[in-house]
Image (cartoon, grey):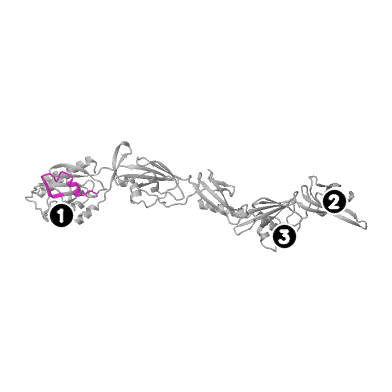
Amino acid sequence: MRIRPLLLSTAALTFLTACAYLPQNIVAPTTEAAAAQTSFDLDVQAVTASVISQANSRKWERGFVVADSGSAALASVVPASVALSERYPVATGKVAYTLGAGDVLIFTETRNSIASDGVSGLIANTERLVVSNGNTIVSPVFGVLDVSGKTVEQVRSEISERLRQRAGKSNAVSILPKPPVGIRPIYRIGAGDEIAITTVSSEVSTNGVSQTLIETPTTREIRVSSQGSISLLGVGEVFIEGMTRSEASRAIADALTGAGLDPKNEIVIKRNVANPARLIGDVPVQRTIEILEAPIDLANVLSEYGVRPTDEREFQVKLLRNGIEYGILASEILGSADTARIYIQSGDTISVEAISKNTSFDLYVEGYNSQKVSVISSSASARNAVLPITEQGITLVDALLNAGLIVTPDSEYLIRLTRRGTEYRMSAQKVLVEHPGASIYLRGGDKIVIEPLEYSKQTVMVTGAGTSPKLIEISPTTRPTLATAIFSSAALGNIEADLKQVFLLRRKEQVANSFDAYFIDLSDPTRLILAKELQLRPDDIIFVSTQPISEFSSVISRINGALTNGLGTLAIAGFK
């Protein structure tokens, strides 16, 4: 029912009759009196469940006290939607971490090794790599690698490729000539060698009837001197260095003959000290191999000293002989019994190097230093912080909680996120309370500013019943009701209060000087349930009439006066 104050309509009479209240002696105001009043449109509605549902659907927007840009001493109340001006970043998902200057990487390469007992195993070589200002890492294993803007997985792939290339290049034996096969060694005596010489002394024995020649062998072990000679009794020095065993035997025989001695002799090489072969590289122990007259097969030597190729590893064998380097893979030597024999010669150097068929390494980030997020707080409830971004990523919620920000139902903060020159604005209530699971992942270089927002004071006014208007502060978090307001005021305690005529006046949205007037008869206890359900909104006016009221026009006139005076009071209090 729409009523213009001081003007009575038939509908008003019908409304009041339905409310079990019949005004008496109603007198319409004069034209002059009506003209003197400020005109307000009232849409009077009896409070019912459906009316309450419609009234409670009115949006409650809180306002913030914001300092005026022109003067820090002045401030104005700005709606929350304007103060926040929310704008969320489009890219909110997690992105892969990319490496940059200052990051610390741990690189571990695992390779095969042979223990002293000949058993093969794995050893790990670990390096700590720091990304330089030029965004590179350096390792003796894979060289210099540019990691700028690359993920750890991308760097792993590049290292793996380099190790595969290195494995191919390390198989240097593929470009070397194969060692000669089937050539038995010819041993030549050298200084320091130990030989055993057996000579024969002859004696004629006479028994009176016949003579018998008795030959007595004598064996002596002699070391070849540094000059390459040996010393024989009754003969002197005999030079034998560089000779084969048979050549040395002839030289000794000639010396014995020259001394008038029996030239018979036999030489046995006891130790090859002057010119042994050497086995070095990836073997349990570096060895010297004495090459005597019996030939020694390279395959037997490799097997004896633990060189056994597997599916995971290979050995390359290099043979240096008389200044010429030969090469062959161990699997070629040991792969078949029919393989032609490679005999070791005096002075040979055999180098064995284990090479892995499969690259095995690990790479991970130990220190995340290149990408950081800064948090700056102008509130005492949060602290400044600089947070590193890791491979797990960090969300806006993580950053705010790390800064110690706690949001209560009665507090609000403006979260300003600056990313690459663009600012995004968000409500801390929405980020932390309403939608904490809606992850907004941060990027390196993001800057977060936390600004506290001060809620403006919001009130309703209770007037009528012969009392002075009273402002009651309300909170949207507790959702106060009509019952809360009127029973906490002195209006109902006034003897003039008429519980049958309680009005809740609420300005209509986007309609000037027009109000919804929710009417309720609180003299009926059952109506108190409705009063407890009807929520208040900022700037509501609760009007309690006095009793008795003999004219309905008088009620309307008093509501009109309450609106006129109340709006002036509200204006003083900062309401619009």
Q: Is residue 72 above or below residue 559?
A: above
Looking at this view, is 193 or 35 the one in front?
193
Is 44 included in the stretch rendered in magenta?
A: no
Looking at this view, is 394 or 30 the one in front?
394
Quarter of the image for residue 340 reads bottom right
Q: Which tag, 3 or 1, sits closer to the chain's start?
A: 3
Q: Looking at the rendering, in which quadrant would you find the N terminus?
A: bottom left
Q: What is the span of residues highlighted in magenta in the rendered image?
A: 479-502
Instruction: Inspect the image, locate mark 1, and give the three-letter code of the amino acid beneath it.
Output: Thr
Q: Looking at the rendering, in which quadrant would you find the C terminus?
A: top left
Is 484 included in the stretch rendered in magenta?
A: yes
Q: Could you classify mark 2 by the number of other residues whose Cα lies within 10 Å: few (under 14), some (14-19), or many (20 or more)?
A: many
Instruction: Inspect the image, locate mark 2, and give the three-letter code of the amino acid beneath it.
Output: Ile
Callout 2: SS: helix
Q: Which residue is mark 2?
A: 252
Query: Mark on residue 526?
Result: 1
Query: Mark on residue 341?
Result: 3
Q: CA distance from mark 3 to mark 1?
A: 115 Å
Quarter of the image for residue 10 reads bottom left
Instruction: Inspect the image, locate mark 3, and give the three-letter code of the amino acid beneath it.
Output: Arg
